[in-house]
């Protein structure tokens, strides 16, 4: 079998490609950018208003109640951290397995991780009753000699997120170094050159630097894989370490990791399609990229289906009355339409990707990817709602109805994510210049 | 209701208008009010005597709790209470163990009375035609007006009151009547006992009061009667009735036939949803078998078989069998009950009425209505009654009152009647003044003030004395004068003793020398497509407590509705009238109507709709106004409880009042949450469930000096909610309002779950109070990231409020869902709207933190009381005796269903109860090892009725 090509024949050369990628950073923003910026800014303002309202009114501004004490806040957190999971996973696993095609997507996938994890980090804090004391989860010297409670999965979570965000930042920055040097070299203004020069940490592109850089990048990638697994496993433990029906399940950690990869890959697909169009990078982000990425999505959807089925099986086979009642509630209770929609979007819809024609049709792929993310958000919210609405004592059974503030913060967080990307597009290349250049050059030689 | 809008409009013409009050005056009044409120936080000036004996000249220890016995009334009847006073502020009321109407227990009304004292909406100043006035201005105006009436001997004068049992008030009314012989004293209660008065008249020739002795009854039949339900005798009746319903050979058997499920119906061994025809048939069948010349009532064979089995059981227990008939039944039914009880030689004492007013309530009120309409009234004085709201012609009456040259309303609140009157004047709260009252069994007791009046108010005795021409009387002197009159021996010693113990040895009910009751046959009743049955509200009584936020937020025991009540309809009737759950409906009778929201209740008798009174208040402040419709206009002149030939029409979709519990059906495995044992199974040494803790890998924290535990007897819980309100008062639990409850939030630390098992139309219903389980392996503890939820050495799960950051993981992981989260700043008192809620702070228990926004809270087993017990033990050097520490819910419980104590004390009652055959552990299989455990319910079914519930 002839090696697959990840760039189109006749792709622009190294310099031209670099210029095309760097242009949005070094030139004035286009009208389209401003339009997108305004839209994302408005949504961000909505999120800020929602959070401000939450801070002034208390968490009472949300739909949470006495039984369903968790709601959108935790669901959004799990969803965003899931998306944040994929970028580093993609980038590091593909690097370690020497998938050359990663060159075109790794930068924005890693950026996505950084932004999504940062947004995810907002939610556990704003969901707290007294958010001003969030730092009490950290072990810091204090007059009362109090430490956090090490048995609580929330403390594990605190560390998992903190280390994951810090690590993702370092990993992203290391990958960005050579490109910062490119920007330094291409920038026209003195100040711009000075800023990029400082950020590039004296990168000259010598053979020694390239060798050291490659070694560091691979080493970090090796560290990344277990971290990626740990962060969402621990999110899974937030639920699995409880004794509530529907939560206390040993499958949760791996199931959460796969779910995270699943939703994250879908967001990467959407981003790839947008960046490809916006930056005119059809030559380096090819339909072949979409083809491989959707295959991974397809595989993940099957694993997700198996995970759901194993939950049902365990509830039936375990013979525990509370679990069986829980399962009945899932399939016959008031949230049933949402659950069916979740199954359809996460398991049924991705099966369309068995069709090779569809895998290479960017429009369809983007629609499927978006639907999967809707499905994954439904999964996150349903994990919370189903269990808390219908646990052991019938007297406590209560349904959840979201408030306007809940909706505003969720919608706003999407806008904030877009806003961060739009800003990043103006200060750093969204696609790796040096890696795509290397790929294009290698394939041009072949 | 359309009629009531007229009242609020007419109110503007009366004292509602504050003429000529400019900004400066308003500020002056505000400052004066604030100063008055501050100044009054102290003990009354006269000598009052603490409940526990105080040494002479003992200083008031700051922060120490002092207890004083006093008396509160419900519908005029006295109930002994003990007030806990800290630094001059009464903060909590409990039942007085020495008083036979409370026996140490209490009900929701007693528990919530403390909130009325500090209610920001309480009437705080008198007002007259010229606006806000001083009490002395009112007294002057009243004095002048009454002086003018001396000429006509009071012919145009009317005094309107509720039921009065207090000897002092009765003495003063006699004095007023002596001054104005032509005056008419109108006395009525919306929840009256006219049927009983008339029925006993039919049977005995004069009105008498039957007092059942439940402790002596082996078999009890309740026909529309609800002895466990709300009312002045609830506590005493529940104590006696439930005392014999906890299993064992002495367990009584309880039959209930009633239109709508009541607390007595829940406790029954056999309950029938019964309309008047069925009730009548059962009563007649019993009478027939006792030899009465009665025709059998028309009823199905099934009903007659039931009636036959019940009758046989009652007759087999002659001398120890009892029949009770409710206030909503006809006078003839009451006469028949008197006859039947006589034939059964039932344990019933017949006493002379405690309420000496000669007229029936409805007659008395109708006379006022007529006199007002005919213009025979020139001066009207209303004392502690609210006819504009609860009289059938309230709206007409309001207009008539508006036309009177002189009208005055004296009460705790500026209510609908006050709005219609020219003058209104605030009465002191029962905890601010001296008084006396008599309980339903005839026990007299004194009320002593626990605090100086917070506002410029007077006691009812002082107001009556004013009318009797004795102005500037001191309330204490008025009460003393009453008792001094008949004193034999050392009055001072008797007075002291009465204040310390809370009860007077004098008085007591006179056993009536009643003749044998006559047989009175029951008139046939016509079939009616729909009957409306009006019942007391378990939280608001007749609506008079509508302004009390604790009571508004206290769930209905059966429907769990708060902040309003819906109309209960049987499913078949709902279909007939085309009504769905939550629809807005109009009930009408003739040209009168009332709106309500419909709830479909499977256990409701077909053909009968039930609506609790208490809705439709238009002038009950930010808390009580505008909730539901007022059915009073439908009741007619004779203040009926049961209204035939109601028309019911659907108006459109509406919204049921919010509820605190959505699901109440137990089936399959959930049935083990509230197991029921039969007396036979109990005798055969069956266990409701395995109460051994499952094995665990977790280490159990070592037991310290004490191991606190609670055992709740589900067989004894009648669902009265006294524990809920007691917990609220003790632990500074905020009121959150209907909007928050509709979202699904609530703050009560203790809830009473209500569950149904078996067929929906004839459910086996039961109650399960749920405080914190204080698990030994508590799921809430390891999940808290900041260790705000910790285990202490005595086995309590402590919640450290100032450490809590509000992640709510503890509640997410609590299988019992007993934790409560401050989603908003609930302690700020938002339900009172713009009113200044500073006064409410005075009620707060200084031993309990007030929780801020964003903090989780929960039942602590009243840890402050445990701490007080520990301190006392350290002081005396004696170990804490069993029963020395009692939680607030335990004290409140009228049936002593809650036991609390130390498992380390082998002889403790809780330790013994944990070995009881009925003992079970809620969700035992989870291995949480709760310290709160339960005793299963017991039923004593009649074998002759087979499996029928």
Image: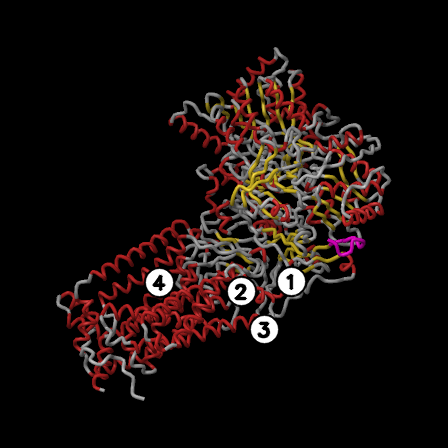
Question: Image quadrant of residue B392?
Answer: top right
Question: Image quadrant of residue B294?
Answer: top right
State which tag comes first along the sequence, 2 or 4. 4
Q: Secondary structure at mark 4?
A: helix
Residue receiving disc 2: A331
Residue at image x 49%, y 51%?
B743
Please tell me whether mark 1 or mark 4 is closer to you in this view. Answer: 1
Q: For the stretch drawn in magenta, what is the main secondary structure?
A: loop
Which numbered dot is residue A317? 3
Mark 1–mark 4 distance (CA, rounded to whole Å) = 44 Å
Give yes or no for contact between labels 2 and 3 (Cβ–Cβ under 8 Å): no
Mark 2–mark 3 distance (CA, rounded to whole Å) = 17 Å
Q: Is residue A189 above or below residue B901?
A: below
Q: Position of residue B485 (x, y in %)?
A: 71, 23
Mark 3–mark 1 distance (CA, rounded to whole Å) = 18 Å
| Chain of the residue under the numbered disc 2 shown in the image | A
Most distant residue in the bottom direction: A1
Colour scheme shown:
secondary structure
Q: Is residue B812 visible?
A: yes
* Magenta span contains residue B946: yes
Please tell me whether mark 2 or mark 1 is closer to you in this view. Answer: 2
Same chain for mark 2 and mark 1? The answer is: no
Residue at image x 34%, y 64%?
A118
Query: In the depicted view, which residue is nearer to us: B849 or B599?
Result: B599
Residue at image x 39%, y 25%?
B22
Q: Position of residue B292 (x, y in %)?
A: 85, 38
Mark 4–mark 3 distance (CA, rounded to whole Å) = 39 Å
| Chain of the residue under the numbered disc 3 shown in the image | A
Task: Report the magenta residues as a range.
Answer: B939-949
Please tell me whether mark 2 or mark 4 is closer to you in this view. Answer: 2
Q: Answer few, some or many: residues within 10 Å of disc 4's Cα (few below 14, many 20 plus, some between 14 and 19).
A: some
Which numbered dot is residue B668? 1
């Amino acid at each position: 079998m002839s090696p697959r090509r990840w760039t189109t024949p006749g792709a622009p050369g190294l310099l031209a490609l670099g210029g095309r990628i760097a242009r949005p950073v070094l030139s004035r923003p286009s009208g389209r950018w401003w339009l997108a910026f305004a839209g994302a800014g408005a949504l961000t303002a909505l999120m800020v208003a929602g959070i401000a309202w939450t801070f002034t009114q208390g968490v009472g501004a949300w739909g949470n109640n006495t039984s369903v004490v968790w709601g959108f806040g935790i669901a959004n957190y799990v969803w965003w951290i899931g998306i944040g999971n994929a970028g580093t996973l993609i980038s590091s696993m593909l690097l370690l397995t020497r998938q050359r095609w990663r060159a075109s997507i790794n930068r924005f996938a890693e950026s996505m991780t950084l932004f999504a994890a940062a947004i995810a980090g907002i939610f556990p804090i704003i969901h707290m009753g007294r958010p001003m004391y969030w730092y009490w989860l950290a072990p810091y010297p204090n007059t009362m000699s109090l430490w956090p409670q090490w048995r609580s999965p929330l403390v594990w979570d605190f560390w998992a997120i903190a280390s994951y965000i810090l690590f993702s930042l370092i990993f992203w920055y290391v990958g960005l170094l050579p490109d910062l040097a490119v920007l330094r070299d291409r920038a026209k203004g003195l100040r711009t050159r000075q800023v990029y020069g400082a950020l590039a940490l004296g990168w000259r592109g010598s053979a020694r630097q390239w060798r050291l850089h490659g070694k560091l990048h691979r080493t970090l990638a090796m560290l990344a894989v277990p971290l990626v697994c740990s962060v969402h496993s621990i999110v899974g433990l937030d639920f699995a370490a409880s004794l509530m029906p529907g939560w206390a399940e040993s499958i949760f950690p791996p199931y959460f990791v796969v779910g995270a990869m699943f939703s994250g890959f879908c967001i990467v697909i959407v981003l790839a399609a947008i960046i490809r169009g916006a930056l005119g990078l059809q030559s380096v982000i090819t339909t072949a990229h979409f083809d491989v990425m959707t295959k991974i999505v397809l595989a993940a959807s099957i694993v997700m289906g198996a995970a759901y089925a194993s939950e049902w099986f365990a509830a039936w086979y375990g013979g525990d009355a509370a679990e069986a009642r829980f399962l009945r509630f899932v399939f016959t209770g008031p949230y049933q339409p949402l659950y069916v929609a979740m199954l359809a979007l996460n398991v049924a819809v991705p099966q369309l990707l068995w069709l090779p024609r569809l895998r290479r049709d960017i429009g369809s792929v983007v629609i499927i990817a978006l639907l999967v993310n809707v499905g994954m958000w439904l999964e996150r919210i349903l994990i919370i709602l189903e269990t808390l609405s219908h646990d052991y004592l019938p007297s406590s059974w209560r349904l959840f109805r979201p408030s306007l503030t809940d909706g505003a913060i969720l919608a706003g967080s999407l806008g904030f994510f877009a806003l961060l990307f739009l800003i990043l597009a103006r200060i750093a290349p969204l696609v790796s210049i040096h890696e795509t250049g290397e790929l294009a050059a290698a394939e041009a030689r072949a | 209701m359309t009629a009531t809008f007229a009242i609020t409009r007419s109110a503007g013409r009366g004292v509602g208008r504050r003429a000529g009050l400019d900004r400066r005056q308003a500020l002056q009044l505000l400052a004066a009010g604030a100063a008055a409120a501050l100044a009054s936080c102290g003990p009354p000036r006269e000598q009052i005597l603490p409940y526990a004996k105080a040494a002479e000249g003992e200083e008031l220890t700051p922060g120490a709790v002092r207890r004083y016995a006093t008396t509160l009334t419900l519908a005029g009847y006295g109930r002994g209470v003990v007030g806990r006073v800290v630094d001059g502020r009464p903060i909590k009321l409990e039942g007085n163990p020495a008083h036979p109407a409370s026996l140490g227990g209490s009900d929701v009304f007693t528990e919530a009375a403390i909130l009325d004292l500090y209610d920001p909406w309480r009437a705080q100043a008198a007002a007259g035609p010229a606006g806000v006035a001083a009490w002395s201005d009112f007294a002057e105006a009243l004095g002048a007006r009454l002086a003018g009436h001396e000429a006509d001997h009071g012919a145009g004068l009317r005094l309107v009151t509720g039921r009065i049992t207090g000897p002092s008030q009765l003495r003063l009314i006699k004095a007023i009547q002596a001054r104005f012989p032509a005056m008419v004293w109108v006395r009525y209660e919306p929840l009256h006992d006219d049927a009983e008065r008339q029925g006993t008249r039919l049977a005995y020739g004069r009105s008498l009061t039957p007092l059942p002795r439940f402790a002596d009854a082996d078999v009890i039949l309740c026909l529309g009667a609800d002895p466990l339900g709300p009312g002045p005798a609830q506590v005493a009746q529940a104590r006696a009735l439930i005392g014999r319903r906890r299993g064992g050979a002495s367990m009584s058997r309880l039959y209930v036939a009633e239109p709508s499920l009541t607390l007595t119906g829940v406790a029954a061994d056999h309950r029938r949803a019964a309309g008047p025809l069925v009730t009548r048939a059962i009563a007649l069948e019993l009478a027939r078998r006792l030899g009465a010349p009665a025709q059998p009532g028309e009823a199905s064979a099934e009903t007659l078989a039931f009636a036959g089995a019940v009758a046989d059981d009652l007759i087999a227990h002659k001398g120890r069998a009892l029949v009770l008939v409710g206030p909503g039944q006809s006078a003839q039914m009451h006469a028949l009950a008197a006859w039947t009880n006589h034939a059964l030689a039932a344990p019933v004492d017949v006493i002379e009425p405690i309420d000496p007013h000669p007229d029936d309530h409805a007659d008395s009120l109708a006379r006022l209505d007529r006199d007002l309409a005919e213009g025979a009234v020139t001066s009207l004085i209303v004392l502690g009654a609210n006819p504009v709201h609860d009289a059938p012609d309230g709206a007409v009456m309001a207009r008539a009152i508006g036309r009177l040259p002189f009208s005055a309303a004296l009460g705790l609140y500026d209510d609908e009647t006050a709005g219609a009157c020219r003058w209104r004047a605030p009465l002191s709260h029962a905890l601010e003044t001296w008084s006396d009252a008599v309980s339903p069994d005839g026990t007299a007791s004194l009320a002593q003030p626990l605090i100086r009046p917070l506002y410029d108010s007077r006691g009812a005795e002082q107001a009556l004395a004013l009318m009797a021409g004795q102005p500037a009387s001191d309330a204490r002197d008025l009460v003393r004068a009453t008792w001094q009159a008949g004193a034999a021996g050392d009055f001072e010693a008797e007075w002291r003793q009465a204040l310390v113990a809370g009860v007077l040895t004098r008085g007591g009910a006179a056993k009536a020398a009643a003749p044998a009751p006559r047989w009175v046959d029951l008139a046939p009743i016509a079939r009616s497509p729909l009957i409306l049955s009006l019942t007391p509200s378990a939280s608001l009584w007749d609506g008079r407590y509508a302004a009390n936020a604790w009571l508004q937020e206290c769930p209905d025991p059966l429907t769990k509705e708060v902040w309003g009540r819906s109309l209960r309809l049987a499913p078949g009737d709902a279909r007939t009238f085309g009504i769905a759950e939550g629809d807005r409906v109009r009930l009408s009778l003739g040209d009168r109507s009332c709106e309500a929201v419909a709830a479909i209740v499977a256990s409701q008798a077909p053909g009968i709709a039930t609506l609790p009174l208490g809705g439709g208040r238009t002038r009950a402040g930010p808390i009580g106004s505008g909730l539901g419709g007022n059915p009073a206009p439908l009741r007619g002149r004779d203040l009926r409880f049961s209204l035939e030939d109601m028309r019911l029409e659907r108006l459109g979709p509406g919204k049921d009042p919010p509820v605190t519990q959505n699901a109440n059906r137990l089936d399959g495995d959930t049935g083990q949450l509230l197991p029921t044992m039969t007396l036979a199974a109990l005798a055969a040494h069956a266990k409701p469930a395995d109460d051994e803790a499952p094995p665990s890998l977790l280490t159990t924290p070592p037991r310290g000096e004490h191991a606190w535990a609670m055992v709740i007897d589900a067989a004894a819980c009648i669902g009265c909610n006294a524990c809920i309100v007691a917990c609220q008062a003790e632990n500074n639990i905020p009121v959150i309002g209907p909007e928050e409850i509709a979202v699904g939030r609530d703050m009560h630390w203790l809830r009473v779950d209500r569950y149904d098992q078996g067929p929906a139309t004839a459910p086996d219903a039961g109650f399960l109070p749920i405080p914190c389980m204080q698990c030994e392996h508590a799921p809430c503890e390891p999940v808290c990231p900041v260790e705000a939820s910790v285990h202490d050495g005595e086995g309590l799960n402590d919640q450290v409020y100032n450490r809590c950051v509000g992640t709510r993981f503890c509640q997410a992981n609590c299988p019992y869902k007993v934790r409560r989260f401050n989603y908003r700043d609930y302690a700020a008192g938002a339900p009172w709207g713009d009113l200044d809620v500073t006064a409410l702070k005075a009620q707060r228990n200084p031993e309990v933190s007030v929780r801020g926004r964003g903090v989780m809270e929960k039942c602590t087993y009243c840890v402050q009381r445990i701490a007080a017990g520990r301190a006392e033990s350290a002081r005396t050097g004696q170990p804490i005796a069993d029963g020395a520490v009692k939680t607030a819910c335990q004290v409140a419980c009228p049936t002593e269903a809650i036991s609390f104590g130390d498992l380390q004390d082998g002889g403790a009652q809780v330790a013994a109860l944990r070995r009881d055959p009925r003992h079970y552990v809620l969700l035992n299989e989870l291995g949480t090892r709760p310290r709160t455990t339960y005793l299963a319910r017991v039923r004593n079914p009649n074998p002759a009725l087979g499996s029928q519930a």
